[in-house]
Amino acid sequence: MIRRKAFFRMNPVAATLVSAGLLVATSAARADQLADLEAAVQKLQAQVAELKAQRAADEQKAAAAPAPAPAAPAIVVNPVPAIPAATDVGNGAALVPAPGFLQLKAAGGSFRIYGDVDQYLNHMHSSSGAKINALQDGAILRSRLGFTGSKDFGSGVAGNFTLETGFNATNGTQADQANANTTTGLTTSGRLFDRQAWAGVSSPYGEFRVGRQNTDIQSQGNYIDYTQRNLGSVVNSFGVPSRYDGDFAYLSPRVAGVQVVGHVAVGGGGQQNTGTFNQRVAQLRVDYAAGPIRIAYSGLTAKAAQGAAHGNQVYYHNVYANYDWGQGTIYAVYVHSNNGGGALSNTGGNEVGNIPTVLPGSNASVGTAYDIYQLSADYRMTSTLRLGGLYGKIKDTQNSSGSASGWSVGAFWQAYSNLTLYSLVDAIDNSSTASFGLAGSAGLTKNFSGTNLTGRRITGVQLGGLLRF
């Protein structure tokens, strides 16, 4: 008996309905999955949009906030060069920047060590036939070592100080030597900080200083002539009041191009041994600077000591102007003063001196007024080479025989950022009783006197270098 396999057979209609049900179920499952995916994508898109909005807000906030200042290093050795200004820390004008020696910065304060060494070979010839050959110090700047610093108190207010000592680089001696002068009664022990020693407070409303300070007549030398009113300058040969003890000063901010500076020196700085040396010296400078033009007055008056034999008030009035025409500068200056005269030899000493060397009222030369006229110009051949020349006259208003005239030409080469090499040819021609001589920032240690100076023509050739650090 043969068995036959039996197969399950479904009605065609039923089979069709079952197949349709399976398809429907599968399609529903796929639709649910697609809906889930679409929801997830929308959620991700929302998160991306939120992150983009947050980043845009952060970028906008960062752009509005000021950039943080880089932290200043605690110690800076040979800091980035800064162009020296015509200030009283001892830096003269320069064509290119000069580096400082050492600068410390921390917590809103700074401390800097600076200085210079200036030496030159000096050949001078007198019409008497006498000659001098010497190595001298300080044609442009007396050699010196200085310390200056400041402390920021906030709101634009800061404390400042400067201590500066001069020395003769040719032999190492200090500039201010001990002295016992029986003629004037002036006794000095030889001060350490002979150039400057002051402290002060600066603010947006100006600066106040007290101590031993440069006169504004001395500190504004950069604007007087191409020599910075030093060796080769007729004005400098006449004599320049340099600095005073016990000096109170106010320096205004510059407003509409104008700055006003006032000083009153009461003396009594410890170098004078009698009350008669505590005479008052008052100074005033009014300075206008706008673009290439500068016009200024700088002067002083010194009260004679009580009971002085010559009670004349000593004065030095100085008006100067200069114009920078792009390739150089033209200078003009006029001085009216009784702060000189042949009796003082005009070799660095003057009636209103640094200590002072001669007490106002003790010298008869205060009765003689002088007018000094000088024109000067320089030309910048390159960014580091400058040529200049000047001509000036010293007129004795009482006696023409006490007058003199002079001229100079010079070249200054900024060999390196802190080294200036210079050469000068200069002359001064004295009338019969005049005895004016050539002088630099520092007085000459070897100089003419007597018959080799009075009424003579003095010519000189100088070659030297100024190293600033």
Image (spheres, rainbow, N blue to C red):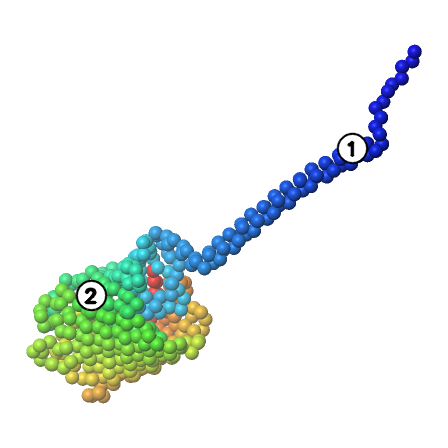
Q: Is residue 28 left or right of residue 111?
A: right
Q: Which of 21 and 218 lies nearest the eye of the viewer?
A: 21
Closer mark to the observer between disc 2 and disc 1: 1
User: Residue lying furthest right in this view?
Assistant: 1
Secondary structure beneath label 1: helix
Question: Which residue is farthest left?
Answer: 307
Question: Which disc is residue 356 wearing?
Answer: none
Mark 2–mark 1 Cα distance, whole angstroms, equals 113 Å
Q: Give the quarter of the image for residue 128.
A: bottom left
Picture quadrant where residue 141 is located: bottom left
Q: Earlier in the sequence, mark 2 or mark 1?
A: 1
Residue 176 appears left or right of 203: left
Above or below 469: residue 267: below
What residue sits 29% from the left and 81% below the top?
Answer: 319
> Residue 151: x and y, percent?
28, 58
The residue located at (15%, 66%) in the rendering is 269
Q: Residues within 10 Å of mark 2 (few under 14, many from 20)?
A: many
Give the labeled residue for mark 1.
18
The answer to whether residue 145 is left or right of residue 385 is left
Q: How many marks?
A: 2
